[in-house]
Image: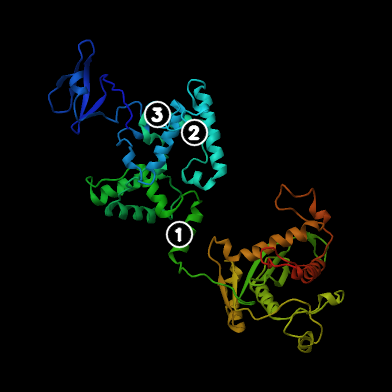
Amino acid sequence: MTAAVAWDLSPGNEFVVNGVPWTVEAFQPQVGKVVLVRPEHEAWKTSVRQLMHHPNIRPSTRTRKDLPAASRGRQPKGVLDLPPSKRPLVMLRVDHLREVETGFRSGDPLNALPGEPKPQYDPNSTTLTERRHAKVRELRQDTIRNPDLAAAHCLDKVSYRTLIRWDLDRRRFGPVGCADDRWLREATGRQISAAVREVIFAVRHETLHRSKLTAKDRERLIHQYVREEFGKDEPVPSYETLRVVWKEWFGSTGARQRFAVSAARAQAVATGRHVVVSRPGQVVALDTTVLPVKVREQVFGDPVSVHLTLALDVYTHSIVAFRLTLVSDTSVDVAMILRDVMMPLPMRPDWGEEMEWAYPGVPGSVIAEFTDGKVAGLPFFAPETVTTDHGSVYKNHHLIEVQRVIGATIRPSRVLRPPDKQAVERAFGAIQSLLFRILPGYQGVDSSDRGIDPESDACITVAEMEHLIATWVVRTWQNRRFGSYYSSCRS
């Protein structure tokens, strides 16, 4: 079954005769005469009767106004374009449309099935709208009774508007109009010559370190490069093809240029292997941030800002050491915090027994023998690898000597790669939300959240803040269950 297509013989429309395109130059309906022309050929004067009975003629899709714009100039879709497994599904949809239209699955009263027409589909007693609503109810009931079969037939989500759309497309394109466009055969794809491929990679390498360019800018550079290297005879794909190929090969271009450059550099040196942290002390992450709470210095009592440096064990997420400095930290401060990582934290006078060493495997009495006192419940070990950022305090000879003495490896994280130190970044955010926000002198996350005068609210000294953080780390942080890492098998 094929759709009947009305011929438009107005001047300018095109017909394909024996595989050759001809354009209508003139049409005289009063005498049934038509004049067809094509470049470098004599005009073909014929009649409408001869055209109608020609064995190999069809309207060209380039001038058919009944086709969507995307289908003009292309081979019309047909049933043969469908996979063999989808053709019965299309004909099943056509049968449903015939039953809605005529009351008979075959569309012919002479070939009626037993019980046809059904009362809800009888054209003599129902309207077309009523029959369509009845068909929707029937398909929904079939879906409830056998959802798997309905899904296999692709009839489980049919609505009233779906039936109208199928019917209109069937009248325009034939049975294939009822098919899902995703069932049609895939496009043949794009072809990129070796020369154009070389040019695309050259333009990528050239523009990576420059400011961000649009797809149109890259297209102009590709055309320029092709003309200079391969001459004007080398064909260049269209803009849309270049845009799609660029996205397939290099990913989306929506990122900021600095992040795109960083990602390209990381990809160039990537080994394909990932570091798996499997034991305590294997990786310790160091980072420094400004304390979001104003404190008072101990000499003159002025409100000041201090820097907080954290050392976090990546495996256990334990804060194994921290340090407060009035000014920005130095390499000496980094060396001291590494020393604190390897030394046990002594108990303080106001700390109770619940904060003492309580780790299995090593009794607290053994630890107390070489520390001359009780030890708080904070891990200590010799770190194997220390991950830092790219601050100047980590790039000096003093820290290199510290690295040699303690036998650790200090490695900077990748540029613009926060996941390399995401554990310590999350720790900063957790401490801020769990502790710092409720303290007087808290400055907020930015100037919009800042109070009227956080400096005047500051009442905690640097020493008191250090003691408060140490108490909170040992008592709260070390005993806190983290949802992302705690076992799901909870009692």
Label 2 Cα crowd, 10 Å radius (few <14 / some 14-19 / many 20+): few
- What residue sits right under mark 3 in the picture? 107
Residue occupying the far left of the picture: 42
Residue 259 drawn above or below residue 398: above
Within 10 angstroms of label 3, few (less than 14), some, or many (20 or more) residues? some
Separation (CA) of disc 1 from disc 2? 47 Å
The quarter in which the N terminus is drawn is top left
| Mark number, residue 5 | none
Name the spot of residue 169 as percent of width and height, x first.
Answer: 40, 31
Q: Nearer the viewer, residue 454 or 347?
A: 347
Q: Which residue is mark 2?
A: 162
| Nearest to viewer (mark 3 / mark 2) | 3
Q: Residue at x 62, y 77 (%)?
A: 279
Residue 378: name its quadrant: bottom right
Image position of 51 (left or right of 224): left
Q: Amino acid at mark 1?
A: Ala
Residue marked by disc 1: 264
